[in-house]
Amino acid sequence: MTRILSVHSFRGGTGKSNLSANLAAAFAARGLRVGVFDTDLASPGIHVLCGFTAGPDSHTLNDHLQGSIPIEECSHDVTPSALGGGRGRIYLVPAAMDGDRIARLLREGYEVERLNDALFSLGQSQRLDLLIVDTHPGINEETLLSTAISDCLVMVMRPDQQDYLGTAVAIEVAQRLMVPEARLVVNKLPAHFDAEQVRARVAQSYGIPVGAILPLSDDLLTIASGSLALVDVPSHPWSAGVTQLAADLADALL
Amino acid sequence: MRSSEPLALPDGPLSMGRLLALEPAALRQLLTMGLRAGLAEPELDACCAAAAPLLGHSPEQLRAGLQERGWLRWDPGRQRWRTRLGSERPPAPPQA
Ligand SMILES: Nc1ncnc2c1ncn2[C@@H]1O[C@H](COP(=O)(O)OP(=O)(O)OP(=O)(O)O)[C@@H](O)[C@H]1O
Ligand SMILES: [Mg+2]
């Protein structure tokens, strides 16, 4: 059975999409078949990190949720060539990027039920080991669903007060939805912060395991605009942190 | 425990927001399991047995109440009970 890993945060801009895409690469490097769903339908972005450019005929998640295109036809192999030799694969289900489609989705909505069926059905038909769900920030019907069906919830936060408070709310929700596993990831840790102190504080505040403490990094800002840090600069501390997190998650889930 | 009172659950389709607010925890557990892999018959029995007394009803009443609301449906493809969200209506009758 495909394991579902949702990457979520209470507030926006914490680094969910970067983490999702790079985790996918780390899992694929371990020989796993990974699906990545962009469920941030209002402000999609992970396709850029995965190097995916939609052609005129390429289908997106919107075509499945608001139409009749099978989910398999909305999934695209984006395995980086550096990883192409092994069994590992990354299949991206991108969200539509043109303004009209986004507006239509927001206007008309869709049955969140279809998203659930799509996740399970792609997992089965592509024989995926793992499905990573990159989410919209905050709490809404989609994020509640992706939380509820997760085998593991990865909560991403920055080390600031607003994120501390918001993350507590999201974790309480996850606990009400009986999520079996959760990890906290602190991202964008400024260089002058003591990582071990932050780790201890966060672990104590939330009572769920800390998966990684990832540095704030200008290099990442540059790389992250269009490709995967894990592929471009694998020995960078941020990439090393994500690789380690993927190893831990693979042990816990597979 | 058995009650002649109607089941103290909201009417109408299930949404995630609604699921999140449900008590007791055993009922949320049942419905989240139904969203994930779905429940085999003995699992559904066990979940209903755990949740129903806390609602003051029998397991059979709870099970019937969930089905009447369309929150729980048998999935013949998967051979499991699955939680259904949203306002899926039964298919329209064929046009003559
Ligand atoms: N560790 C980091 N150091 C520096 N910049 C980072 C780091 N992580 C992410 N970023 C940058 O922060 C911005 C937001 O990242 P990303 O899009 O991954 O966040 P997000 O949580 O998915 O955002 P949204 O909530 O809008 O979906 C991007 O410009 C990204 O390059
Ligand atoms: Mg994002």
Image: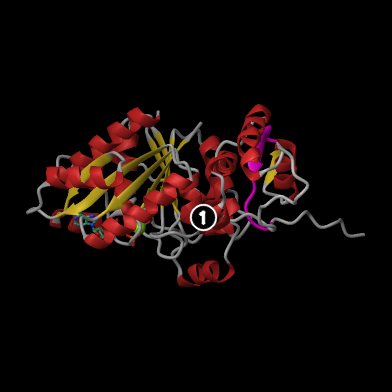
- Where is residue B55? Give x, y as percent: 64, 45
- Where is residue B74? Give x, y as percent: 71, 39
> Image check: A47 left or right of A161?
right
Q: Nearer the viewer, residue A136 or A68?
A: A136
The structure residue drawn at horizontal position 59% and vertical position 56%, both measured from the top left corner, is B15
Q: Nearer the viewer, residue B84 or A58?
A: B84
Residue under numbered circle 1 = A61
Task: Residue lying at the far left in this picture: please name it.
Answer: A192
Residue A206 is a magenta residue:
no
Magenta region: which residues? B77-87
Pointer 1 local density, CA inside 10 Å: few below 14, some 14–19, many at least 20: many
Quarter of the image for residue A32 reads top left
> Image check: A200 left or right of A58?
left
Mark 1 Cβ inside 8 Å of ligand 2: no
Q: Nearer the viewer, residue A151 or A76?
A: A151
Residue B83 is a magenta residue:
yes
Residue B31, visible in the rendered structure: yes
> Image check: A232 left or right of B81?
left
Judging from the image, mark 1 belongs to the subunit labelled A
Residue B76, visible in the rendered structure: no
Quarter of the image for residue B81 reads top right
Q: Quadrant of ligand 1?
A: bottom left
Quarter of the image for residue A12 reads bottom left
